Image (cartoon, rainbow, N blue to C red):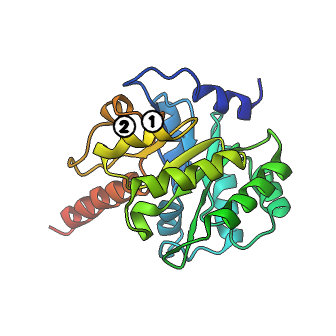
Amino acid sequence: MSKVDEFRALHRGRAPGDPLVLPGPWDAASARVFEAAGFPALATPSAGVAASLGYADGETPADEMFAAVARIARAVDVPVSADVEGGYGLAPEELVERLLAAGAVGCNLEDSAGGALKDPREHAEFLAEVRGAAADRLFVNARVDVFVHGDGDPERAIERAALYVAAGADCVYPILAPADLLPLLRSGIQGPLNALSRLDGEGPSPAALGGLGATRVTFGPGLQRRSAAALREIAAGLRA
């Protein structure tokens, strides 16, 4: 079984309360830690990678992002999906080839730019072109930014998700959707549903998110930020 087939299979038949938990490595060392802990696959966070490279979120040059993904994918044997933001303005064919060259088995693609939602039909066309170029070689996770840059209307999120699934998206990611809306989103969205787990103790656990309807759970840059906070504490102690 190829790595992309293995990754796709991990999304199937998930029992309620048992979502696919995908930690977000920001470099090769963190990827190896998560692999050694037993996670079956990983999903890079663009903001976490950006921080590790010294950039603000959304400002990482495409070449550096793909190089970072390649280092992570080479460091582990488990499948790695990559957050490539909005695709860096690349044509679908080039985007797909660069992801595959980096060793990624999947990607996140967001439906906003510059803090505003994209036209959903135009974005669906883009996703369809990515799917056409990738065929079955990539698992496409379509991020829905209604709860980040839109009005937070779950019905609008469901409408956008339907367009993206019809275009060939393998999974839908309504990032920052309130946990209490997950059952509604689950009922209206076909296929796997990605939920964001917060690490501040304020939100439900990954298992609880699975019970609410999430097929898979990711953490955004939360793990990298928590690691940086721990390092700041260590650094402060060195100066005590």
Q: Quadrant of the C terminus?
A: bottom left
Residue 65: x %, y % from top left: 64, 65
Label 1 secondary element: helix
Q: Which mark is residue 187?
A: 1
Q: Is residue 218 above or below residue 9?
A: below
Which amino acid type is marked by label 1? Ser
Residue at the spot 62% in from the left edge and 46% down from the top edge: 81
The percent position of residue 206, horizontal first and vertical second, equals 35, 36
Q: Percent from the top left, x then y, of residue 73? A: 66, 46
Q: Residue type at mark 2?
A: Pro
Marks 2,1: beta carbons within 8 A: yes
Q: Residues within 10 Å of mark 2 (few under 14, many from 20)?
A: some
Q: Quadrant of residue 143?
A: bottom right
Residue at (30%, 32%) from the top-left corner? 208
Residue bearing the label numbered 2: 183
Q: Quadrant of residue 13?
A: top right
